[in-house]
Image (cartoon, grey):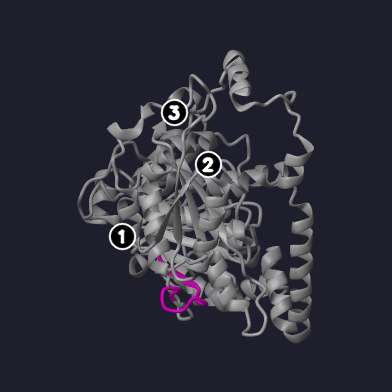
Amino acid sequence: MAEKTLAAQFNKDDLSVIDHFTYCFLGDGCLMEGVSHEACSLAGTLGLGKLVAYYDDNGISIDGEVEGWFSDDTEQRFLAYGWQVLKADGHDADALRAATLEAKAETTKPTLIICKTIIGLGSPNKQGKEDCHGAPLGNDEIALTRQALGWTEEAFVIPADIYAAWDAKDKGAKSEAAWNETFAAYAAKYPTEAAELKRRVSGDLPADFVAQADAYIAEVNAKAETIATRKASQNALQAFGPLLPEILGGSADLAGSNLTLWKGCVGVQDNPAGNYVHYGVREFGMTAIANGVALHGGFIPYVATFLMFMEYARNAVRMSALMKQRVIHVYTHDSIGLGEDGPTHQPVEQIASLRGTPNLNTWRPCDTVEAAISWKSALIRAEGPTALIFSRQNLPFQARTDAQIADVAKGGYVLAKEKGELKAIIIATGSEVSLAMEAYAQLEGVRVVSMPCAEEFVKQDAAYREAVLPANIRARVAVEAAHVDYWWKFVGLDGRVIGMTTYGESAPAKDLYQHFGITTDAVVAAVKEITA
C-alpha cells in the first residue's frame, strides 16, 4: 500500500521513481493467524498488484501435521479476497521463477503463489515431520542428510559455482545505478517534487513545521475552548495535516467517533494518491500495516480505534515500539467516561499496559492545549511510536502561562502552584485534571501536577523533575480513571491513588465517577488524610 500510494503521489507519466514489488513469505501457521485474514482481505480490496506472497505449503506446524487444525481451502480463500492464485513446486527454482513473472504481470491484484514443499527435504529420518520444524537435525542426522544430498563440502563452505549463482551484488549495483539515473532525470525536470520526496523518505519534517505548530498551539490557548479532547485532536489534525503531506491516516471503522477525518482527507480506495485508509474492523491488521508503512518510508502513519480495542492490536503496538517506528496510535473513548456502553467498552488496564511498553510515549491530555502539544510531540518524535489517548466527553480548558505551555512538552509540569507552604501534591492526567483543580480550590498548600506523558517526564533532568515533584514532599495523591497500580511509582507506598481497581459498569459517566469514588470530594479527602 505504501508503494502504491507514494507512487501515485510522485510518479509522472514520463518518469517513475517509485516502482517496486513487495514479497512476503508465509507458512501454514502464518495463515492460521487472524491478522493474515485482516491484511490479505484489505490487500485484495485495495488491489495491491505489486504484492506477491509465497505460501510454503508443507502441511506441518510445531505440533505436527496441520490437517487436524487447519483444513482451509487456501486457494478459494484467497480467490475470495480478490487475489490471483498460482501454484508451483516449491522445490523447482524454474517453476518458482515462472510463477513470479506471472505474478508480476498481474497489476490489479495481489498474488499468492502456493508452493507445495516437503519440510526438511533430504533428511532421511526427519523430512516431512515436525521434528525439523524449529529444531536442529542433530549431528547424526546431519551426516545422513549430507550423504543423501551428495554434499561433500566442509561445514559453512559454499562452493564457488553456487556462490557465483547467488551473488547478486553486480545486478544490485546496476539496478541502483539505473534508478539513480532515473531520479537524476526526475530531479532535473521536477525539482520541487524530487526535493519533497527526498525530505519525506529521509523522515525530516518541513523546516518551518515546529514554528507553525507552536503558532497553532498559541491560537488554541487563546480560544480557551471546553471540548472533548477527541475533538481537539481533530482540530490539531486539521491544522497540521495541510503542513504534512506525508501523513497517512486511518481508522478501524470508527472515523466518525475517533474524529480522525479532517477536511483534506482523501480515501485511498477511491484515489491511490490519497492520504486516508478506511481499514474496516481490522485493528490488528491496521496497526501492523501502519508499521509496514513507516518501515517503507515516505509517510507518517496514524491509526485510530477506541482505547479498549487497542487490545486487538496489542502485538502490533509492541512491534512498532520494538522497531522504533514513527507510528501514531490514536485511541479515543478513554475511560469509564464512555458511560452506558459498559465494562466491555470501558478501558481500565489499557493505559498502564501502554505505559509499560518500552520506547512508547503515551499521552493523555487534559484539554485542547495539551492535545495539540501531544500531536506535535508525536509528529516530531522520529525514534519511536506514540499513543494519543483522548476523551469522549468535554473537558474544561485550563489556563496556563507561556512558561507552562512550554513545559507541557516535558510530559509533566506544575499546572497550579501551591498557596503558601507546599504540603501536598496532586498528580492527574486527562479528564481527572479538572477534578484535581476543583480539589485545589478547596485546599491550602497543595500543588497540581498535570502529567500527560510520564515517559517524557522521566526523561527530563533531575533538577526539573525535582522542581515539579520535590522529593521531600511525600504527601502525594494521584487521580486517574484507570487502573491505580501505575501511579504508585510517583506517589510511593505511603501516598494515595484514586482510580479503578475493578472493571466498570453501564451508567451515565457522571454516575460512574460517583460510584467508583473518582470525585473532587475523594481527592480532597485523600489530601486531608495524608497531611493530617
Report which residue position mark 2 lands on. Answer: 91
Closer to us: mark 3 or mark 2? 2
In the rendered structure, which amino acid carries the disc numbered 3?
Gly
Q: Which mark is residue 80?
A: 1
Q: Is residue 483 above or below residue 337?
A: above
- In the rendered image, which residue does mark 3 sit on? 128
Considering the numbered disc 1 on the image, is that residue within a helix, a strand or a loop?
Answer: helix
Res 242 quadrant in image: bottom right
Chain-order first, disc 3 or disc 2 = 2
Q: Which mark is residue 252?
A: none
Q: Is residue 87 above or below residue 240?
A: above
Locate residue 142 relative to residue 284 in the image: left or right. Answer: right
**Quarter containing the C terminus:** top left
Q: Residue at x 59, y 13 (%)?
A: 140
Residue 475 sits inside the magenta stretch: no
Q: Position of residue 46 (x, y in %)?
A: 42, 68
Read off the magenta span.
267-278
Q: In the rendering, at what x and y percent does residue 178 appear? A: 76, 69
- What secondary structure prevails in the magenta region? loop
